[in-house]
Amino acid sequence: MHSIKKEFIRWEDKLVEVKKIYWTHHVKDIEAVKEYLNADVILQRDGRYYFCETVQEAEIIEEFANENLNLDSSKTNLEVTNE
């Protein structure tokens, strides 16, 4: 199984996900790369561009009270066999 490594940077009280990193001398059209990667933030450091997307904060759509949830505990028991 493969895992996908995601890199995040805290920048100006925001959390951004790094989409792609390129050496500055390899990028000819910053805006085209930004659009291609669907990035909304570009950071530059140590001769590299970091094309990033702002992580949106969670929004509560609807609140549920615990007493409104009906769980059937008989359906949560699992039988495990040793074969």
Image: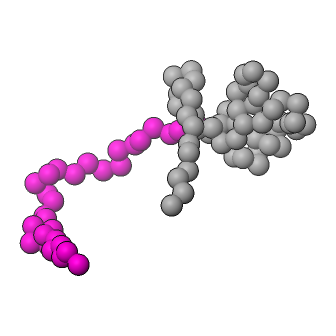
Residue 55 at x, y percent in the picture: 53, 38
Toward which corner of the image does residue 18 lie, by quadrant? top right
Determine if residue 61 is in view. yes
Q: Which residues are magenta?
A: 54-83
From what the image shows, is residue 56 above or below residue 1? above
Toward which corner of the image does residue 51 lie, by quadrant? top right
Residue 52 at x, y percent in the picture: 65, 37
From what the image shows, is residue 30 above or below residue 45? below
Toward which corner of the image does residue 19 lie, by quadrant? top right
In the displayed image of the protein, which residue is found farthest to the front? 83
Q: Main secondary structure of the magenta part?
A: loop
Give the residue drawn at x 30%, y 50%.
Answer: 62
Give the residue drawn at x 45%, y 38%.
Answer: 57
Q: How is the image coloured?
A: one colour
**Residue 17 lies in the magenta-colored region:** no
Query: Left or right: where does residue 30 sit relative to residue 50?
Result: right
The C terminus lies in quadrant:
bottom left
Residue 76 at x, y percent in the picture: 15, 68
Query: Left or right: where does residue 3 sit relative to residue 34?
Result: left
In the displayed image of the protein, which residue is found farthest to the right? 28
From what the image shows, is residue 46 above or below residue 81? above
**Front residue of 8 and 59:** 8
